[in-house]
Image (spheres, coloured by chain):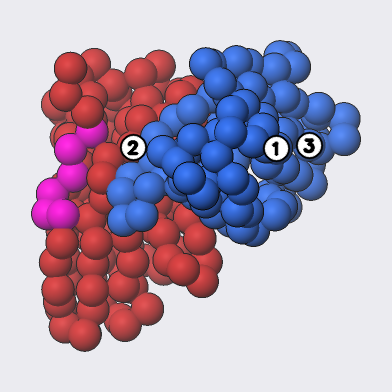
Chain colours: A blue, B red
Amino acid sequence: KQEVTQIPAALSVPEGENLVLNCSFTDSAIYNLQWFRQDPGKGLTSLLLIQSSQREQTSGRLNASLDKSSGRSTLYIAASQPGDSATYLCAVSETSYDKVIFGPGTSLSVIP
Amino acid sequence: KAGVTQTPRYLIKTRGQQVTLSCSPISGHRSVSWYQQTPGQGLQFLFEYFSETQRNKGNFPGRFSGRQFSNSRSEMNVSTLELGDSALYLCASSLTGDPTGELFFGEGSRLTVL
């Protein structure tokens, strides 16, 4: 049974710092991995999607990497800003047409 | 381009009642999936529809059901509400029809059961 974990559960950093969020999954046979952002009481916003054949994806200040063999993904945020404060979730799909399994999320607070 | 629209945004029900939530996907998206989010269990998959057919279902009791219409709009229904059904219900749509394609989420429907 696929399980997704994220560490740390919460993170507080001063503005301008670079930071890394971690995601681990137990079964390496994934189809893709997605990183989402969720603001309090809101829906999820897709940040990056990495197909199983890819190693990383970049969008602006965000970079996500994927290491299937070790069951890990990292989300790197450069030059953090207060507007980055949110909960970040990673999610994996094991096969095409399969359900998406979410991690518990990392709550990020960027202090001005 | 309009995003995923969920209605109602907030609702309060009492135990034993039933509720219907609606989701309109992004135009052109044919796959719609539903998720329940609670502080204790996090985000859990409910079910996914494509071309009016349920392709996947999560581990929820039969009180939770859904359907999809020919215009790809979807509804989910929860009957005989329990206190534990209080949650944020999120709908997501996908362009390719493949639920593991990029997901676009709505703002959710927050259900409170008293």
Callout 2: chain: B
The residue lying at 53 percent from left, 16 percent from top is A59
Left or right: residue B55 versus residue B40 is left
Q: Is A83 in front, or is A90?
A: A83
Q: What secondary structure is found at the residue carrying circle 3? A: strand
Tag of residue A47:
none
The residue lying at 31 percent from left, 49 percent from top is A42
The residue beneath circle 2 is: B105
Amino acid identity at mark 2? Phe
As measured in the structure, the alpha-carbon distance from the residue carrying label 1 to the one carrying label 2 is 24 Å
Q: Viewer-nearest of labels 3 and 1?
A: 1
Same chain, labels 3 and 2: no
In primary-sequence order, the first of circles 3 and 1 is 1
Callout 1: chain: A
The residue lying at 63 percent from left, 53 percent from top is A11
Same chain, labels 1 and 2: no
As measured in the structure, the alpha-carbon distance from the residue carrying label 3 to the one carrying label 1 is 12 Å
Q: Are marks 1 and 2 in contact (CB under 8 Å)?
A: no
Residue B28 figure quarter = top left
Amino acid identity at mark 3? Arg
Rendered location of residue A92, percent (x, y): 62, 37
Magenta stretch contains residue B33: no
Magenta span of residues: B4-9
As measured in the structure, the alpha-carbon distance from the residue carrying label 3 to the one carrying label 2 is 24 Å
Tag of residue A72:
3
The residue beneath circle 1 is: A20
Left or right: residue B41 versus residue B52 is right
Question: Visible in this render: residue A42?
Answer: yes
Task: Looking at this view, name the residue that lies furthest to the right.
Answer: A70
